[in-house]
């Protein structure tokens, strides 16, 4: 059935940044539009031929206010960015509104939301690229939005230029490493000692491939390259151990480990965490990763770091042992979804920081809600699960006094935040 063509006016931006038109059949989501746009669209067909809530933009007939020319030639094809067409003021409004709307769904009407920290272009220091060898060609880039199709990218205005400079050399290298039609995922992280590269591929690594990777590391001055096949990871070359620098504290980076997406975003989140834990003597840092917050906090307090990935805790511990002037840092390997810190364990702390993955930390929030910990700081990469967990804390007697939006994933539609709760 051919898609239905309509002309609609865009009323507002939705949570993922798509424009929303109110129609007789309900809201219709139109990517790459702004409020006030009058657009011609093709309504997508949903399951079993039903009218979908999604539409494809065919033409902007009357532009709304606040548009800008998207800086990237891959925009609207590459699924990495959704909002490059928003000018700065409109983008900032959307960032704040994104969090306000999520909170509103959980009954928060009057929480003070600070001006968002919005990262600059060329700042993303970690990229997870997909690659596929097709005959003599290599596609390297990101997937199309809501599709498995790979978009071959040559530019990326959000990424750190040293990472972008590797795109073409990697494209030349990959046919020497992968058989035809093989897929790979390439994880690049810019560290304090150079770029760390993890290639996860559907192919074993022969001697010639090892030599090619070693030569590549020298030619492009990479810190290290690792190869992962079926979950088994091998370090192929280390020229300098990859290290992160957390406010002057050096920590070894396990291959592919989580780091905050940009240095500026990390600093903004850490500034909030440090400010809101000021005066605390004993702090628990839950979902601690390799110590982004735990180690700098240990300059002023004893810190207990809890994390589910053992390799990350070992790196944190190594960072603590190598640093000067820290107070006691203890580590605990624990699955906080299944075994959150319980109220009697939380009683040992006068501040708790938690920074869970996108699923949030419902079980931990429930335990915190029953505790007497005076100060709780949430860091979140998902406003929806954050709002759910915030409701649990507030129903347990905490006051949510401040929220700082932090946008490290410029133009992507993803929004992060730090929030302060206290009794
Ligand atoms: C968003 S990252 C934050 C890491 C750290 N706070 C930072 O800023 O670098 C979430 C962390 O939670 C950890 N994690 C995920 N699921 C977990 C679980 N069930 N129990 C404990 N930690 C978990 C991940 O390994 C990851 O280090």
Image (tube, rainbow, N blue to C red):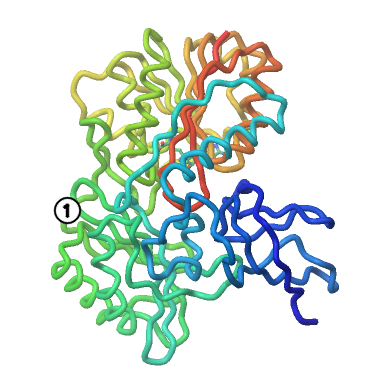
Quadrant the N terminus occupies: bottom right
Which residue was labeled with disc 1? Answer: 240
Quadrant the C terminus occupies: top right
Front in this rendered view, residue 7 or 168: 7
| Residue at screen point 84% across, 73% down | 49
Q: Is residue 394 toward the left or the right of residue 328 in the image?
A: right
Q: Position of residue 317 (x, y in %)?
A: 32, 32
Check the image and name the residue furthest to the bottom: 135
Front in this rendered view, residue 39 or 224: 39
The answer to whether residue 366 shows anywhere in this view is no
In this rendering, is residue 94 above or below 317?
below
Q: Toward which corner of the image does residue 395 lie, by quadrant? A: top right
Q: Toward which corner of the image does residue 371 lie, by quadrant? A: top right
Q: Position of residue 290 (x, y in %)?
A: 37, 37
Q: Position of residue 45 (x, y in %)?
A: 77, 72
Q: Is residue 326 toward the left or the right of residue 46 in the image?
A: left
- Figure label count: 1
Q: Is residue 10 toward the left or the right of residue 135 in the image?
A: right
Q: Position of residue 5 (x, y in %)?
A: 73, 73
In this rendering, is residue 197 above or below 373?
below
């Amino acid at each position: 059935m051919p898609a239905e063509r309509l002309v609609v006016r865009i009323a507002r931006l939705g949570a993922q940044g798509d424009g929303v038109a109110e129609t007789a059949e309900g809201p219709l989501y139109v990517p790459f539009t702004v409020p006030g746009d009058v657009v011609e669209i093709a309504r997508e067909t949903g399951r079993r031929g039903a009218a979908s809530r999604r539409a494809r933009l065919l033409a902007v007939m009357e532009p709304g206010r606040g548009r800008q020319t998207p800086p990237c030639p891959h925009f609207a094809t590459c699924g990495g960015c959704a909002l490059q067409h928003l000018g700065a003021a409109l983008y900032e409004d959307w960032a704040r509104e994104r969090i306000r709307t999520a909170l509103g769904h959980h009954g928060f009407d009057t929480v003070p939301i600070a001006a968002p920290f919005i990262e600059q272009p060329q700042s993303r220091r970690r990229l997870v690229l997909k690659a596929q060898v097709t005959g003599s060609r290599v596609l390297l880039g990101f997937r199309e939005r809501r599709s498995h199709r790979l978009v071959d990218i040559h530019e990326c205005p959000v990424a750190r230029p040293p990472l972008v400079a590797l795109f073409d050399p990697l494209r030349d290298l990959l046919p020497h490493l992968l058989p035809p039609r093989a897929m790979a995922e390439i994880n690049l992280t810019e560290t304090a000692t150079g770029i760390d590269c993890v290639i996860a591929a559907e192919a074993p690594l022969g001697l010639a491939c090892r030599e090619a990777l070693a030569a590549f590391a020298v030619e492009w001055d990479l810190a290290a390259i690792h190869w992962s096949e079926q979950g088994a990871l091998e370090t192929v070359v280390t020229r300098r151990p990859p290290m992160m620098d957390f406010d002057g504290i050096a920590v070894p980076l396990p291959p592919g480990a989580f780091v905050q997406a940009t240095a500026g975003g990390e600093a903004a989140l850490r500034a909030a965490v440090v400010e809101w834990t000021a005066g605390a003597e004993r702090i628990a840092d839950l979902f601690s990763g390799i110590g982004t917050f735990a180690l700098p906090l240990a300059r002023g307090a004893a810190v207990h770091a809890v994390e589910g990935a053992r390799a990350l805790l070992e790196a944190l511990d190594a960072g603590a042992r190598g640093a000067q002037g820290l107070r006691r840092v203890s580590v605990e390997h624990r699955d906080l979804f299944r075994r959150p810190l319980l109220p009697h364990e939380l009683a040992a702390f006068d501040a708790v920081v938690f920074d869970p993955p996108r699923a949030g930390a419902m079980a931990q929030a429930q335990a915190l809600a029953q505790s007497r910990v005076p100060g709780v700081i949430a860091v979140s990469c998902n406003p929806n699960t954050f709002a759910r967990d915030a409701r649990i804390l507030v129903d347990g007697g905490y006051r949510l006094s401040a929220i700082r939006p932090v946008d490290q994933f410029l133009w992507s539609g993803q929004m992060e935040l730090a929030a302060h709760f206290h009794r």
